[in-house]
Amino acid sequence: MRRLAPIVLTLALAVLAGTARADSFAVVPTAPLVIASADMPNLPGSIVVPPALSTPPAVPEQLSYDQLLGLWQQAGAAYGIPWQVLAAINKVESNFGRNMGPSSAGAIGWMQFMPSTWLRWGFDASGDGVADPWDPQDAIYSAARYLAAAGGSSDISRAVFSYNHADWYVSEVLSLANLYGQDSGVAFSLDRIQQDLAAAEQSVAEASGRLVAARARVLAAARVQHRWLVRANRATLLSDRLDDQKFAGLAQQRKEAAQAVAGRAARTLAAAQGQLTTARQVSAPISFTAGASSVLGAPSYDNGWAFPVGGGPGVVRVAHTHHDYPAADIAAPEGSPVYSIAQAVVLRSWTVPDPTCGIGMTIRTFDGQTWTYCHLAYLDPKVVPGASLASGESVGLVGESGDASGPHLHLQLQPATAYPQDESWFQSFAGVAFTWSDSPTPPPVTQPLRFAAAVTGTAPAVTPSSTAPVFAVVPSTPATTAAPDVVSANGVVFFDRPNP
């Protein structure tokens, strides 16, 4: 075990009762922070964890930017890990503690450890007697320890790969780390921009949904009113005609009430659109900076094409096939930005949801192909028949309008004779703008990313690689060994850890 130096000192107030003297202060030492070794994982049963490890606390702890920066820097210094990498992992994994899971894979806490991995590498950095992944200090120090065990002091990219066995993950984390290294304030200014942008996108998506629902109620009331008026005109008895007209009048009242609601919803949507425009203008200068593009959901480009959904491979997923005919269902969080895939002309657009397709549009791209987008939560007002769109131009937000089981963009050729996923431009974005949900995502064919050590002054620049990872899935060793979940060979430590 190593100890941080120097010993931290604290002031203890001692009030001397029964005297007229001023209060006296004595300097007393506190227990130093004990740093768990990165050379060996925890022995079974050696740490105390929360009784319900995978259950988040009722009120998760949140920290200020200054507090987080202090933790990243202190934990990084303790284990020889660039603090910018810890900050980037914290952002990618839990959005600085705003989304701590459990994830769909079961990862938990501030740095999204799998419970089994936490039992091996988590420790009580806060000194409260419990190694708690929901505690920011415990989680961040434990992540630094984990990266150090993976050789992060000499090869940070391989260490990050051990944290999540995906090349896109390494690229995303190191890109963010490079950006954070330019100025410690960038992490937080970018975070504020991203939060404002996400809030504006969500507000537009929600306001659009309310407007669509209100207009549907107007239409439903109008149809009921029409039916009663038709009956009244056909009635032969005056009493029947009067009754039908009364019911038609009630339907008219419901229609007018729904129209008032729709009017308010339209004004709310217009205000939300203005806020979104402002948020996009603020984010534009940094949105195409390496490291910031995925965080801000900026479009990814390749040879005149743009991927239609923003957010990056950490949140955007697609399968190679569709459930019943050639198409691509691109899953992404509701409110994610949707872009034109190329320079195109709008052929059709509709904001009244189609029962199947929902809100969407049909465009013809520069190569003569015709594409349809479905299930949008919101379609930009500029997307009207005859409008010209630039590659990567914003056209709406991801939703689940129409016949959809969850938020996603349905993209298909017209006629649907081939899979979009088979297009070379689509495949070029694997690992850059999305991940395959039904098979491993190969590393993108791009220039390898290097961690800019010159910015941090820590370690030589390195290139991420998926070869020879420090951690690999292997069978457990016999229970008679000192550490039953560890095998060591040629100086490399292997763990039976599932991907987070």
Image (tube, rainbow, N blue to C red):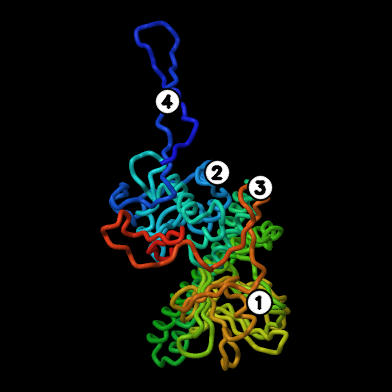
Marked residue nearer the N-terminal end (4 or 1): 4
Single out the mark in the foreground, 3 or 4: 4
Marked residue nearer the N-terminal end (2 or 3): 2
**In the picture, which quadrant includes the C terminus?**
bottom left
Instruction: Answer whether labels 1 and 2 touch (C-beta < 8 Å).
Output: no
> Which residue occupies 64% across, 63% down?
449
Identify the residue at the far top of this view. 20
Read off the residue under disc 4: 29
Q: Is mark 2 on a helix, strand or loop?
A: helix
Residue toward you, 270 or 134: 134
Residue 254, percent from left and from top: 46, 72
Read off the residue under disc 3: 183
- Label 2 environment density (alpha carbons within 10 Å; few <14, some 14–19, many ≥20): some
Q: In this view, does 495 lie to the left or right of 77?
A: left
Please say if 149 is above or below 301: above
Read off the residue under disc 1: 340
Instruction: Answer whether labels 1 and 3 touch (C-beta < 8 Å).
Output: no
Read off the residue under disc 2: 73
Residue 434, percent from left and from top: 56, 72
Identify the residue at the far front of this view. 490
C-alpha span from label 4 to label 2: 23 Å
- Label 4 environment density (alpha carbons within 10 Å; few <14, some 14–19, many ≥20): few
Q: Is mark 4 on a helix, strand or loop?
A: strand
Amino acid tagged 4: Pro
Amino acid tagged 2: Gln
